[in-house]
Amino acid sequence: DAAAAAAVPPPPPMLPHFDYQPKPYTGLRADDILQKRKAFLGPSLFYYYQKPINIVEGKMQYLFDEDGKRYLDAFAGIVTVSCGHCHPDVVNAVVEQNKLLQHTTTIYLHHAIAEFAEALASKMPGNLKVVYFVNSGTEANELATLMSRLYSGNLSMVALRNAYHGGSAGTIGLTALNTWKYPIPQGEIHHVVNPDPYRGVFGSDANAYAKELQDHIDYGTPGKVAGFIAETFQGVGGAVELAPGYLKLVYDIVRKAGGVCIADEVQSGFGRTGSHYWGFETQGVIPDIVTMAKGIGNGLPLGAVVTTPEIAQVMAQKIQFNTFGGNPVCSAGGLSVLKVLDKEKRQSHCAAVGSHLVERLRNLQQKYELIGDVRGRGLMLGVELVTDRKEKTPAKVETAVLFEKLKDLGVLVGKGGLHGNVFRIKPPMCFTKDDADFLVDALDYAISGI
Ligand code: PLP
């Protein structure tokens, strides 16, 4: 009867159909790998799940574990896999280059680095035409900081609270999340109040945040700064989109104080936000230096710094070199990424799928008090969980429980924010509307069960 039928819980949502069979896996199992990691890979590693998953294969937006179980990768590795796991064009570019020449450095000539630099420069606005290839986002931000200090002749860097720019001896100073910080000297860094529309003390009032930055310069520096760095969409900090209008105001202030403006596009570039190719374009500004990594290589170890010829001039005083930056294999792979994203019109795809996903998430927010905020653009989204909407109390425990449940249902999302209470949804840019529906259905199912 009706009462009995109502008592039967609904079945869990099913992953969308995907026409691909993973290869049989016969390698080391999760427990053996874990043992070796504990023995040989240092104590500081953290695992995403209570029982870490042994991922053995990836195909576009999906991952497969050692048992052939399929997962929807709604975090794109770590926002690295822009085109899709093992996208055939990228695989082909890398394999073909590997057969010809795996390594040469910039002390020789190679066509791939030149073609890649030209293609990347063509994606930049204004006079951002000089490219330096490095191996990671951290290294890109190290180089950007060096350039700022050399070019301006000043020392003080300004960064946002809640920022993540890397964990090296230099960039750890720019990063402003205590979960990542070691107590080492951090240099001349000023962390200003974060223009976070949801949690920030001034709400969406860009003028108030900009005034606070001006105060830092007036009271905490000699009146001159080397540079200002910000992610337009904070990633590790919990998918925070900066208050509209903020960057325009602070770029003016920073330039008046002799500094250069750096946009960290490690997560937000390459059309992921849907509306624009670069995150900073959503704020109508053109930076002096742009740093990028992650999605630039679809997972290959690759980063870049792009700046103006004028700023690049300061790097001519000494040798600027690193052994692997712009190596042929990564350059060939990176060039193919740019081509795939254009050919497959991934920016407009992110806009369309992203707006559908946001709409569905906002509907879910109406159903559950637990969902305090749904934010972002394109496929660069955050869902923040709170136990009290008014106080915005971080729902740490619930987030951790749901995170595991989502994994069991076959969805991998990212986790972020200082309190680990934000789901970060940044899938490969080939993520479909069906995938979006599945993700929301899985979240609905998981929340309804706690
Ligand atoms: N900048 C941002 C915005 C990042 O999200 C990250 C990494 O998460 C970095 C810089 C550092 O990049 P990498 O881990 O490649 O060194």
Image: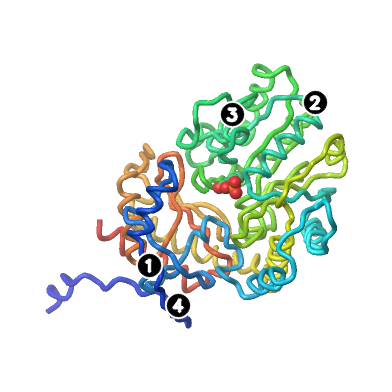
> Comparing marks 1 and 4, which lies closer to the viewer?
4
Task: Determine the CA span between mark 1 and mark 4.
Answer: 15 Å
Q: Which mark is residue 294?
A: none
Q: What residue type is labelled 2?
A: Gly
Query: What residue did someone put label 2 on?
Result: 153
> Comparing marks 3 and 2, which lies closer to the viewer?
2
Residue 265 in the image: x percent, y percent? 65, 49
The disc, 3 or 1, on the residue closer to the chain's N-terminal end is 3
Q: Which amino acid does label 3 sit on?
A: His
- Rendering quarter of residue 301: bottom right
Circles 3 and 2, Cβ within 8 Å, touching? The answer is no
> Comparing marks 2 and 4, which lies closer to the viewer?
4
How dense is the environment of label 4, judged by Cα within 10 Å: few (below 14), some, or many (20 and up)? some
How dense is the environment of label 1, judged by Cα within 10 Å: few (below 14), some, or many (20 and up)? many
Query: What residue did someone put label 3 on?
Result: 191
Q: In which quarter of the image is the C terminus?
A: bottom left
Circles 2 and 4, Cβ within 8 Å, touching? The answer is no
Query: What residue did someone put label 1 on?
Result: 410
Residue 415 in the image: x percent, y percent? 44, 50
Q: Ligand 1 closer than 8 Å to the CB at disc 3?
A: no
Q: How is the rendered protein coloured?
A: rainbow
Q: What residue type is labelled 4?
A: Pro
The disc, 1 or 4, on the residue closer to the chain's N-terminal end is 4
Circles 3 and 1, Cβ within 8 Å, touching? The answer is no
Q: Which residue is drawn at 65% across and 24% down?
A: 188
- Rendering quarter of residue 409: bottom left
The disc, 2 or 4, on the residue closer to the chain's N-terminal end is 4
Residue 300 in the image: x percent, y percent? 62, 59
182 sits to left or right of 25: right
